[in-house]
Image (cartoon, rainbow, N blue to C red):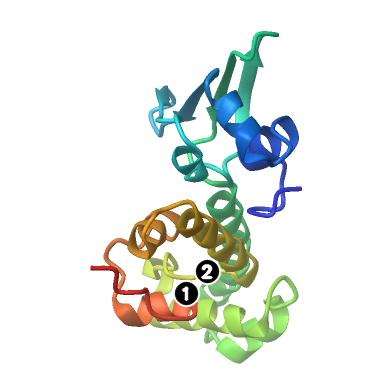
Amino acid sequence: MSQFCGKCDFYDSFVAIRSDGEDEKIIENLKGLELYVRGKDGRRHQVKSDTIKDITKYYPYLESVRYGNQDGYCVIILASDSFIDQEEREHLSYYVRDVEKYYNRCKRKKIPFVVDECVKEYSYWTTPELCRIIAERFEQFGKKADFSDLHLPMHEYYRKRWFEEMVRVGYTEHQAYDWVYKGLFDPPEVIKKRLGRPLKDEN
């Protein structure tokens, strides 16, 4: 399974398996590749795939369609987002849904929403710390609570590996961070929290 998301993703299929992870073979196979990403509109959109640097941006994306011929021609259509982001959203939705069930039950029974009790009952899916953060937001904001800034350790680990690979093939740290972490407007404290250090000043 891929080092970038734990699934058989585009990197695993095209780079590790088809090209044996060797730059010369990757470059040769790129000559016959047509690479597409499925957009939010459901249509496929062709993306630049002339170099290893180009395709690194899509390593942890899962392939939805692949076809080709014996002459090296290959069409690959990728999912609309990286599997890292897809799986993290899915897992976080489970945790939020569980806490919301407790929140709704308290409202229905007209009893206080007690964070400690919620954590005790629902932290079996995840860490008590994360469950507490979610519960505290429900306590403060109710169903208007926002969880878009929450991230899971395993997925942050994969993001860092992907970030490091993008830097290795020639992107600046700022370019790689903006792409991998979707953090174009992240303040320095958020960058340090997520990446573990500040970005290098490459001006």
Mark closest to the chain's N terminus, 1 or 2: 2
> Where residue 197 appears, x then y in whole percent?
44, 81
Identify the residue shown where x is 57% and y is 44%. 59
The residue under label 1 is 194
Q: Answer with left or right where residue 174 lies relative to residue 29.
A: left
Q: Nearer the viewer, residue 48 or 103?
A: 48
Q: Which image quadrant: the C terminus?
A: bottom left
Q: Amino acid at mark 2?
A: His
Identify the residue shown where x is 39% and y is 75%. 191
Q: Nearer the viewer, residue 29 or 180?
A: 29
Residue 173 lies, with reference to residue 73, above or below; the image says below
Q: Is residue 196 visible?
A: yes
Q: Amino acid at mark 1?
A: Arg
Question: How far apart are the alpha carbons under marks 1 and 2?
Answer: 9 Å
As drawn, the label of residue 151 is: 2
Q: Secondary structure at mark 1?
A: helix
Q: Nearer the viewer, residue 144 or 90?
A: 90
> Where residue 117 appears, x then y in whole percent?
65, 87
Identify the residue shown where x is 41% and y is 24%. 46
Q: Are marks 1 and 2 in contact (CB under 8 Å)?
A: yes
